[in-house]
């Protein structure tokens, strides 16, 4: 997967060189780290295009949006042919179908399929430009409904959960003799940018942490995560709350995905009450 992501980034650099799009830089990856995100200064915050090879899809994702809202917006748009509104966790997406990629050990063999996904990304950017006024209304309406983090309470609770997560990461880094000086994830920055998941690579670990920010039924922040190395055993799944960290060893191939586990929690939507 690491080699595939390097190849993908090189091809994206050639394909999108003269556009306003940015894409993820090549990096170390674990075997299922297979989503590829595209952003643009022409797109508002909270809107991202994601190529999901295993789902044979390129999604134009709108955060904190329901499928029904997106359907109503699409009904007013021009050139919607081939576009499908779908619910993707707490986001809704405009989806384009693209060829499936399941064998990430092949690079040149998948080049045609990668270019088909790039074409879809380009089509979605053009669709935004053609229907910007309509889609911008949807984005602004959702933005106005999102809680103002800065005017709410301080971030003490989330920072405390973050400290628990940092302790867990340091313990796992020690197990793999990884760099102890690595800058650790900033959950408050993540929440303020309305991001609910990140991949945190750990140099020397040949892997890292797949992290999701969710909340409990009583609106307290919760972190769920998987960690391990792509070159050996030792995959673990973690739950981090304000007061404890629980971990268990897993067979990653037979366990439900982290996204499926996250779906059993409430999405993180606002800073919890103190």
Image: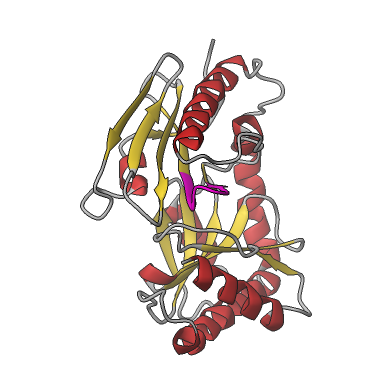
Residue 124, visible in the rendered structure: no
Q: Nearer the viewer, residue 123 or 117?
A: 117
Looking at this view, name the residue that lies furthest to the front: 177
> In percent of the image, x 45 and y 50: which residue is there?
66
Residue 203 shown in magenta: yes
Left or right: 155 as drawn, with respect to 262: right
Which residue is outermost to the left? 254
Q: Is residue 152 visible?
A: yes
Residue 48 image point, x, y percent = 60, 59
Most foreground residue, 15 or 139: 15
Answer with the quarter of the image where residue 181 lies: top right
Of residue 142 and residue 252, the one placed in the foreground of this image is 252
> In percent of the image, x 63 and y 62: which residue is there?
24
Task: Report the magenta stretch's main SS.
Answer: strand
How many circles with numbers are drawn on the protein?
Answer: 0
Residue drawn at x 51%, y 81% as measured from the top left: 114
Rendered location of residue 65, percent (x, y): 50, 48
Q: Residue at x 46, y 61 (%)?
A: 71
- Residue 45 lies in the magenta stretch: no
Span colored in magenta: 200-209
Q: Quadrant of residue 28?
A: bottom right
What percent of the width, then of the height, locates residue 233? 31, 49
Q: Position of residue 29 (x, y in %)?
A: 50, 58
Quadrant that contains the C terminus: top right
Residue 31 occupies quadrant? bottom left
Q: How is the image coloured?
A: secondary structure
């Amino acid at each position: 997967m690491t080699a595939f992501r390097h190849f993908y980034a090189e091809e994206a650099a050639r394909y999108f060189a003269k556009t306003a799009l940015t894409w993820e830089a090549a990096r170390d990856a674990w075997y299922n780290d297979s989503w590829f995100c595209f952003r643009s200064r022409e797109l508002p915050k909270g809107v991202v295009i994601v190529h999901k090879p295993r789902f044979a899809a390129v999604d134009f994702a709108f955060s904190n949006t329901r499928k029904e809202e997106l359907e109503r917006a699409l009904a007013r748009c021009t050139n919607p042919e081939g576009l499908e509104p779908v619910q993707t966790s707490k986001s809704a997406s405009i989806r384009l179908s693209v060829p499936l990629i399941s064998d990430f050990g092949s690079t040149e063999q998948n080049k045609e399929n990668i270019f088909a996904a790039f074409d879809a990304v380009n089509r979605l950017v053009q669709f935004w430009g053609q229907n910007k006024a309509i889609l911008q209304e949807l984005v602004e309406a959702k933005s106005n409904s999102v809680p103002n983090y800065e005017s709410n309470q301080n971030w003490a609770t989330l920072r405390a959960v973050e400290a628990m997560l940092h302790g867990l990461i340091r313990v796992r880094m020690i197990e793999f003799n990884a760099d102890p000086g690595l800058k650790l994830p900033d959950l408050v920055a993540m929440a303020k940018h309305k991001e609910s998941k990140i991949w945190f690579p750990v140099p020397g670990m040949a892997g890292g942490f797949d992290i999701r920010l969710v909340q409990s039924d009583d609106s307290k922040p919760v972190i769920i995560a998987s960690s391990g190395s792509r070159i050996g055993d030792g995959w673990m799944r973690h739950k981090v709350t304000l007061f404890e960290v629980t971990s268990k060893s897993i067979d990653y191939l037979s366990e439900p995905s982290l996204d499926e586990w996250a779906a059993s929690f409430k999405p993180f939507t606002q800073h919890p009450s103190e």
